[in-house]
Amino acid sequence: MLNELKELSDALEKNGISIELISSNYLELPKVTKKAPCIRILVGNDQRIQLESISAERAEAVRKFGNNQGSFPALNLCPLFRIEPGETAKWIAGLEQKKITPENVEKLKQLCTQKNWDDNTFRKIHNSLGKQAGKIQDILQTLHQENPIQILIKETECFQNPLVLFDGLEKAAFSLLEKGINQSLALKVLFYFKKDEKDTGQGTLSVVFDSLKLVLQGKPVVSQQFTASLNSVLVDYELREGNETSQETVDAFGNLYVETDQPLPEVKLKAGFIVTLRTMFKDQYCQKRYGKIGRRSYPIAETEQKKMQSALLWISRGEQKNITWTKTAPQEVLFVFCAQSPVKYDKLLPSLQKLYTPEMQEKTFKDASSKFIASIKIKDKEERNLQHSDSLRFFVLRKLDKGRSKIVYTNNTSPEKIIEARNEWLKGCRNLPNIQFCKDKNDIYPLEVTGYMNAFWNQSGNRIDKDFRAYPGYYGIKVFFGNDKTIIRQNLSFLITKLQRIAPVLGNLLVKKAQNKFAEEWKGSLILLGLYLYKMNCQKEEYMTSYPYLLGQMLKVSDLLHAFYCTVVRQGSMPAQFVGSSLYLSAAEMPGQALMMLSQRMQPYIAWAKTYALRQDEESWRAKWLLSLYEKIAVGLWKQWQRETRFNDEERAELFIGYLAGLPVKEKQMQEKRTDEVQESKEENHGC
């Protein structure tokens, strides 16, 4: 990841895109939700506390200096009192939606008996309001600077005593209850409800201290101005410390640096998880063989660290979603940028995935990618001085566990190669004959591939939900750019193994012209199957004359003839399976044997069709048409006869497509011709 971020930070600097450097110890707050609010503790000179909740938008502007053991001006506390599970807990929880009366307030005060704070809470408060606040003071003194946070530090000195803070929070919470405002917030501050008798948890409250004096000065802690001011001081200090070296030690990029045991910075992505620029756990002894451990195994100067951290923050911003990044899985993000101009190709990511936004009205990959190509041509006209093609960088970042993240895929390409891959992709999507299921779907988006590869159905055609995902979320991008025949053959084998199980179901639905809620998934899977065959140099003009495809067509005609027989002779009473669909799985495994069984089972239906075709009525044309197809396909099978007793994966895919594909002669044309013949016969008889 460091190499990609180095290139990105250089590109941002080259294009004059300013990115704010962030202090590695200046951390973002936890995500604010309705159940987990961020509480603002407003303090004054008289030690009085006011409580209010701040919105998620305002909380994004706030940061805290420190670590998990303590931080300032924001930190994590816990509710003041514990409530045992039972009726009392239910009664208190029910008060959040009701108006609390003075009698209720008095009863709540009587329930405040079991304190929730312990020694660990006291220690965290001391570390936060004492040690971390003291560190900030020392930094300001070292730099000979003043900052608004000094006012807050002075006004919160009294709360270094946890008991003073406890009493202040309790009074402020009951003040809200007595006034009838922010009742839900007050109850969250006061009470932690035990889940059961064995519950030893304490709950958590995200709080941020603020000063009434700072609010009056227009510089509240919960503002971007305050955060930027303190961050600037912290960054200056860290860069100053990082540049103080007496040795000419260089990092991985040739910059002077000072060795330190501090971990590399973290970045909280808008995708919903936190990543560290590089993690090398010092207790993994395998690293010691190289003589260096931890961050020293890949040294990076403090300035470069800041630039990389800021570059990752820039590319993962919320407003950059679907422009420079998109989420491909719960713990997986795909990034893309141009090495010459990071924001130049803003239509690229939307063209690779199906978006449901007002800005993206294109329903097909062809339309969306055409929009991307059009944007390239416009920009090329505006920048006629280009001497070489731009470089586009794709990389996928995945969160492996709580502490580790990893780049799992990278690809360096160009707009020309993307257009070439797009054209090949569209040809592959069209590598199917006429199939009823796919008549209103012509292509798929690359990032839809994973959904089709990870979809499973039982033999009844119903979707099976599995926690296991065989293919990662970004896999479609790998297929889009890749042409490794070995990998494509593996994908084809995996896909056709799933699809052939539901072939009898699909065949029955086509004969009965019925609908199914999983039809969209089947359409995409069929198109993907044709795409894989195309990448294996197996095009429809060739495989539509192959033995497996014609065998599939024979099974389909058998189904249609069997269904026609049931319509005429059995007055529309259809069996659970037709002859062709009942033999499909056998044909996929032992084609020769299945063909022999088919000829035996279809003999009575073929004999009936020959007799029925001689009649002069409106439906006899169908029998004649099906018999002609039987003869035509049989001739093709004879020409393509194979002695092999089993099909390979490509041949099984051809069999599957042949079974679902439309027949070579259109029913409507045959029906119109036969109707004219019947009408002429009637007129001749009438004239006689």
Image: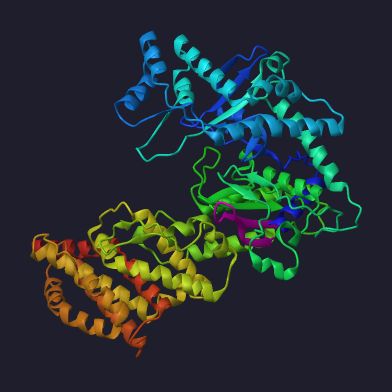
126 left or right of 683 in image: right
Asked whether residue 405 is drawn in magenta, I would say: yes
Whether residue 94 is visible here, answered yes or no, is: yes
- The residue closer to the viewer here, 22 or 94, is 94
310 to the left or right of 109: right
Stretch of the chain drawn in magenta: 391-413
Quarter of the image for the C terminus: give it: bottom left
Q: Eyeballing the image, is 565 above or below 231?
A: below
For the residue pair 143 and 480, the one nearer the viewer reads as 143
Is residue 179 a member of the stretch shown in magenta? no
Relative image position of residue 34 (x, y in whole percent): 47, 29
Quarter of the figure that contains the N terminus: bottom right
Question: In percent of the image, x 37 and y 59: which residue is there?
Answer: 522
Place of residue 90 in the rendered image (x, y in percent of width and height, measured from the top left)? 32, 26
State the residue at coordinates (8%, 63%): 570
How many tags in the picture? 0
Magenta stretch: dominant SS? Answer: strand
Q: Is residue 588 above or below residue 47?
A: below
Residue displayed at 70% across by 22% down:
152
The colour scheme of the drawn protein is rainbow
Residue 9 locus on image (x, y percent): 76, 49
Percent x, y of residue 662: 33, 66
Image height check: is 178 above or below 508? above
> Is residue 438 in view from this perspective?
no
Left or right of 672, for residue 400? right
